[in-house]
Image (cartoon, rainbow, N blue to C red):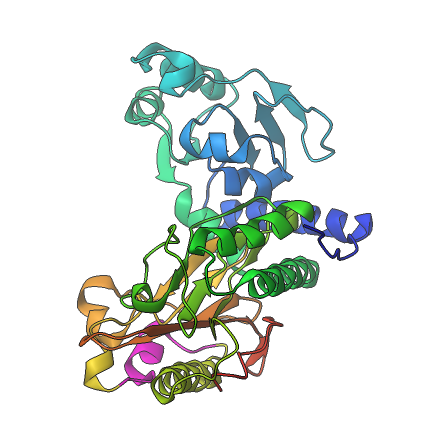
Amino acid sequence: MSVSHIESLEDPVLDAVRHYRLNRLCGVLAAADVDVAVLSNPVSLQFAIDFEEYQSFQSRIPTFSVMVWADGHVASCGSYMQESPLVGEYLPSLNLSHFDGGLDLTDRARQFADLLRSRFTGRARVALERFDASVVQAFLEVGFEVVDAGGLMEKARSIKSPEEVSLIRRAVEVAGLGIDAMKRWLRPGVTENEVWAQLHAVNIAHGGRWIDGRMLASGPRTNPWLQEATDRVIQAGDMVSFDTDMVGPHGYFADVSRACICGDGPATAAQRDLHRRAQDEIAYNMDMVRPGLGFREFSEKAFRQPPPFRAHRYPCLAHGAGMSDEWPKIAHWEDWPHDGYDGEIEAGMVMCIESFVGSETGGEGVKLEQQVLVTETGTEILSTVPFDEALS
């Protein structure tokens, strides 16, 4: 399979992104009165120092870690490549996974806590991310104040610089090429997995990383949503809905959902009706988004589908996006008592506006999603892939 290519971005853009991210993280740590954060989430490692080693492995077995001080000092632990200009010192792996350190991490955790405590005199506050309970206990025993780094990282990642937005645009462009490849491959007799594989191929050819799910379904498997791709053979006239969930070049996320029809025949009236309902929901909610809009207010005033389509609604109205799905996740009003939390949309956020429309009585479903930049006056659409004309 031949793959069309998009030109790589220049190094000055990448350098600006790297320094913006580290400076923003340090500012968030300082504002929270945190002296040092110890990070292990692969997305956090890339955000902090553009660390890309073994990211899928790291998501399950945290061999690598990065320590970021609020004053900007950075120590990288366990990395094989040791050439980042953002890193002040390189240390051996802390071996704080059960794979690396054994079934009982108590001694290793205490050694690490003692090592870090020796760098402070008096009170010190540390933010830990995704470490075993023995690590938290060891830090408390040596006198650290311990807080969760997860919320701090989400806050740091939530506001994008213009250079970051340019990387997101590039990821979305690559996703667009992948969607074109999927549509060229789509024909009666191919499987869902075969179509979905085309997106992976294009992403990898452009230096992309991974795809968070296998969100492509056809025909009766489109409703309810969140059924991942299988070896089902797609038939002529089937609705095909998909969601890219793609971590693309430089670790930035392209989160675009579209629907189309397999084969050359026209869409049915029922298929066009589902698509129109999803478009209406996306457009209405996107028009609401602006800086200062509260999550609760957004949820309360958002578009509501008629009753037959509410039971199978998407899990959220909208969510943040940058290097993955990110805070915030804005719940539907019906789900607010259990799932909702408040906050405020800010300029510089990138958000994904969601819709799934499928009847609780059965039939097919349509999944649509637009990725947008929140500007000072509203939104700018980042998703370059048009909605399918046969369904519009």
Left or right of 271 on screen, residue 116 = right
The number of discs equals 0
Q: Is residue 229 magenta?
A: no
Give me the residue at 53% from left, 21% from top: 119
Relative vertical location of residue 351 with respect to residue 150 in this rendering, above or below: below
Give me the residue at 51% from left, 37% from top: 42
Left or right of 245 on screen, residue 26 = right
Q: Pinpoint residue 276: horizontal percent, then vertical percent.
A: 41, 87
Q: Is residue 296 magenta?
A: yes
Q: Nearer the viewer, residue 362 or 382?
A: 362
Q: Is residue 77 visible?
A: yes
Give me the residue at 36% from left, 34% from top: 146
Give me the residue at 72% from left, 52% from top: 2
Q: Is residue 21 visible?
A: no
| Bounds of the magenta segment | 292-305
Within the image, what quadrant is residue 337 found in? bottom left
Relative vertical location of residue 356 with respect to residue 98 in this rendering, above or below: below
Q: Pinpoint residue 278: horizontal percent, then vertical percent.
A: 39, 81
Q: Nearer the viewer, residue 224 or 106?
A: 224
Q: Pinpoint residue 361: horizontal percent, then vertical percent.
A: 18, 77
Q: Pinpoint residue 335: horizontal percent, then vertical percent.
A: 21, 69
Q: Nearer the viewer, residue 375 or 381?
A: 381
